[in-house]
Image (cartoon, rainbow, N blue to C red):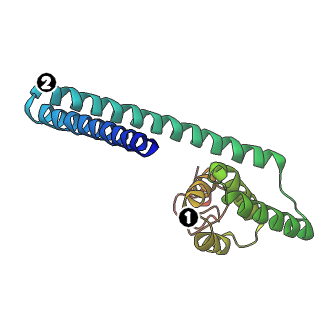
Amino acid sequence: MSSLSSIRTSTILIASAGVIVTGFLAYAVYFDHKRRSDPEFRKALKRESRKEARVAKEEAEAQGVQQKEAIKNAVDEAKEEGFPTDVEDKEAFFMNEVGQGEVLCQDSSKQVEAALCFYKALKVYPQPRDLIQIYDKTVPKPVIDILAEMIALDPTISVGPFGASGSGPGSAAGIDD
């Protein structure tokens, strides 16, 4: 009798699953038909889609503003803390910051902190342009982008012909007051 009972149970389970799948497919067909034929339904879907896109865009803009503010605050705090002036201290500081930055790069939620470590290392490095080329090859792109914003906020870092070296157009040395 137990084999007859197990057959009935499995039959009931299979039938139930068939009913659920059939219901789902019927809803999908109904939704597709309504989407294709009812102009009001299509308009409502488009409105909802636009609303979701607008909300996502506003959230992305707000997050971008918050990140820029966090970057500016981090650079200001680093400047306030100061940087070592002794050669040996600079070397130890550089190695510490690069190592800490590499560790922080592994965690995508700490990109600003990682970029700040690389920024601090860049501040004490004698040839910033060379170090940036190394960063370009080894540091993840999102962190490099944040680092670029940090460098843009600090005119004392000479990274190219238009840097703080005074040799480029628009630099303070080429402007007569």
Q: Which residue is mark 1?
A: 162
Residue 133, placed above or below residue 148: below
Q: In x, y percent, where is residue 134? A: 64, 74
Q: Is residue 57 left or right of residue 27?
A: right
Answer left or right for 43 relative to 159.
Answer: left
Instruction: Give the class, few, some or many, for how many residues have Cα within 10 Å of label 2's Cα (few <14, many ≥20).
Output: few
Q: Position of residue 151 (x, y in %)?
A: 63, 56
> Of helix, strand and loop, which one carries label 1?
loop
Would you identify the image quadrant in which residue 66 lies? top right
Q: In the drawing, what numbered circle is on residue 17? A: none
**Residue occupying image coordinates x 64% and y 55%:** 155
Side (left or right) of 142 relative to 11: right
Q: Quadrant of the N terminus?
A: top left
Q: Residue at x 64, y 45 (%)?
A: 71
Q: Is residue 115 above or below residue 18?
A: below
Q: Which residue is mark 2?
A: 40
